Image: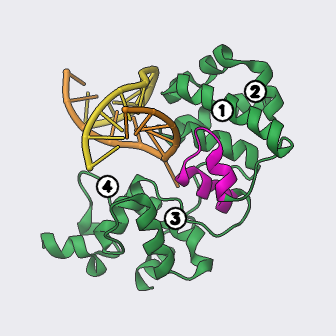
Chain colours: A green, B yellow, C orange
Amino acid sequence: MKIFDILKKTYPDARTALNFSNPFELLIATILSAQCTDKRVNEVTRELFKWYRTPEDYLKLGQEELEKQIRSCGFYHNKAKNILETCRILVKEFGGKVPSNIDDLMKLPGVGRKTANVVMSNAFGIPAIGVDTHVFRVSHRLGLSDGKTPERVEEDLMALLPVEMWSLSHHLLIYHGRNICHSRKPQCDRCPVNSLCRYFLTIS
DNA sequence: AACTCGGGGCA
DNA sequence: TGCCCAGAGTT
């Protein structure tokens, strides 16, 4: 697919901003990342992971103290509650390990389809496309999908791309969304794929 | 499909 | 001040 060839050349270092290879740490960081900048998640987790590295560590920490630690990420009450319940399930049902399939991951509170896919692809190397707001918006603009839900966009992208491109396409579309294809004011004049973009066609 | 959960950065 | 941020859960 030509669009992704260009994006790959344009963003040769596109990779996750939540750069954790440890599945458990990536899971926690990704739960925290909901409606929060990756910059702040990295700040909070850099401190958090110094002291708390396993599900047992968080269960010992407790709700109130965890809320304080993650407060600046927003939605801290729900996130703390979800993280602790997730840790309980990990200990009780998965031997303290993070499962690597989407069904088990999505049973964890605080883990939706996007987070589950990110954990699978970034921590376990399983081809998957996490559809966040960037991927959703950019895919629609480019004309890669007309899906009304993230799941439909995910299906369209998977049908469009070879399996070995799934994980990378997630990073490329996010990178592009953050750098050029902004929600409000997309920088179409300096977009490397504007000649292939459906949205650019409608406005020019 | 619409709504709520929210602190913090930035214009 | 107002808008936005690598979403998920509930109704």
Disc number for residue A182? 4
**Location of residue A143 (image quadrant):** bottom left
* Tag 3 secondary structure: helix
Q: Which type of secondary structure does the marked residue at label 4 adopt? A: loop
* Circle nearer the N terminus (1, 2): 2
Q: Examine the residues drawn in magenta and state their main secondary structure.
A: helix
Q: First in sequence, mark 4 or 3: give its number.
A: 3
Residue hosting label 3: A170
Circle on res. A83: 1
Task: Specify the segment rendered in magenta.
Answer: A102-122
Q: Is residue A161 above or below residue A13?
A: below
Label pair 4/3, CB-CB below 8 angstroms: no
Q: Tell me, yes or no, whether dots 3 and 2 are on the same chain.
A: yes
Q: Quadrant of the N terminus of chain A?
A: bottom left
Q: Which badge, 2 or 4, comes first in the chain's sequence?
A: 2
Are tags 1 and 2 found on a single chain? Answer: yes
The quadrant in which residue A90 appears is top right
> In this rendering, does residue A139 appear at all?
yes
